[in-house]
Image (cartoon, rainbow, N blue to C red):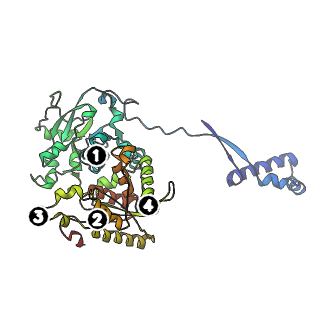
Amino acid sequence: MAKKRSYTSGRLFLAAVATLLSLAFLYHTISPRSSTGVARWIHNSPYAWDALKTATVTVTFHAPAPTTIAPVLANEIPAALFKENLRPEFKYITSWPAFGWNNQVMQYMNLIYLGLITERIPILAPFTPNGHVISAGFVEFGEVFDIPRLEEEMGLRILEWSQVKDPNSEMLEDLGCWKLPLVEAEQRKALWRPHNLELDISYTLTPEWVKVEPRPGEYNDMQSTFWSLASLGYPDTRPANSDIEPELSPVHNVALYPDEDVLCFDNLYYVCAHKGFEFEEPYSPAWRFVGRHMHWTSAIQDIADNYTREALGVGPGEWIPPYISAHIRRYDFERLCDDDVPIEDCFAPLSAYVRRVDEVKAEIFSTKGISVDQVIVTGDERDPEWWYAVHELGWVTTDHSQTAERYGGWYPTFIDGAIQSGGLGFVGTWKSTVSILADRRVSAWQNGAVRTVHWGYKGADEND
């Protein structure tokens, strides 16, 4: 498609070209044989300098054709059967989300990282409302995270199941997947089964050697390593595991070995490179190569910015002043307190968070020269007197009284996550996946100061 642009003498190159063309024209018309003809014309004409000082040239050129992205699916629209939408020259990888939302986010970081090291295209199922209001329904990954930016920064194509298989399809398909080890039967029950994708899955238990430490009953017994799982995607690895029989699928009662085109795992939460639950570690590959590139969509960010302005008392569209975010988790951690430790001793007091916030303020001022006074607190505590004490500190909170009604049941969680990641500093709660991800985002995206408050017994956070 042809485009036209105009350049004036301010663009030095085209102005010089125009000037030379004018001089050439004058040379050939006024004095074809004498170079002094131009000088005489300039000297004698009052309009000559004006003619040379400004020249406008219209350049017509053909813009390069847009870069075409090779299709990674057989059809441009989702198919009734997902297998009909796969291309033979590509390999794919998928898994199913489970547990709380931030845990699901971590699982997808693990999944996408596995896609990266196996050179397979990740297919992401929607987030499922485990631990949330069931009526919130399923939410697409791309509604929350900016997939085009993620693809560009990682150099990896990423798909969602809604692109591969028609969400309205009622055609049940068989699929063979791997089942990872879990310690407790209750954890297995908590796993989401992809019924909404119309998949009838036959699972095969992964071999013992995928574990970090094959010690039954211990924490690392349910932790698998990235490269051991990656090896299951290569045909040469499979003959060594042929003695493991697949389970029958729940509907068609078929036993299928794991699919070779779509490497499939039931859940990827308990996966690591070196040791169990290493997202807090600087070397965490899932964070370094995936998580830090998972930015919020502009829609989520815009909504979160509006809630931030409201919390800080800033008018619509106005500049958001620097702030510190804090996530204080208490309510659902009560089950983790030892029976012989009173609740008031198990949880860290507000004074512990005040101390850490003050440390963050001091670090921001010393490293950036910025004085930050505003603190936005998010948390799950249900005691109104506790929140009153938070407000007495001069700290502010977000008002989610109408959020679910306006945007949906998931959005208080999404908005809080975006607000937490937008601060120049962050103070979180030990063992909380919410705090871990917010900590990493503030560190990576804001080059911010971060702290974690420990708990579990009286004075737990006093041991620096």
Helix, strand or loop at label 3? It is: loop
**Marks 4 and 1, how far apart at CA:** 37 Å
| Disc on the earlier residue, 2 or 3 | 3
What quarter of the picture does the C terminus occupy? bottom left
What quarter of the picture does the N terminus occupy? top right
Residue named by callout 4: 312
**Marks 1 and 2, how far apart at CA:** 27 Å
Q: Which is more foreground, mark 1 or mark 2?
A: 2
Is residue 186 left or right of 162 when viewed as pictured? Answer: left
Helix, strand or loop at label 1? It is: helix
| Disc on the earlier residue, 3 or 1 | 1
For the residues bearing labels 4 and 1, Cβ distance under 8 angstroms: no
Three-letter code, disc 1: Leu
| Disc on the earlier residue, 4 or 1 | 1
Query: Where is 52 relative to 368, above or below?
Result: above
| Disc on the earlier residue, 4 or 2 | 4
Residue 277 seen in this snapshot: no
How many residues crowd around disc 2 within 10 Å: few (fewer than 14), some, or many (20 or more)? many
Residue named by callout 1: 111
How many residues crowd around disc 4 within 10 Å: few (fewer than 14), some, or many (20 or more)? some
Residue named by callout 3: 340
Helix, strand or loop at label 4? It is: helix
**Marks 4 and 3, how far apart at CA:** 41 Å
Q: Quadrant of residue 421?
A: bottom left
Q: Which is more foreground, mark 2 or mark 3?
A: 3
Is residue 238 left or right of 62 when viewed as pictured? Answer: left
**Marks 4 and 2, how far apart at CA:** 23 Å
Residue named by callout 2: 452
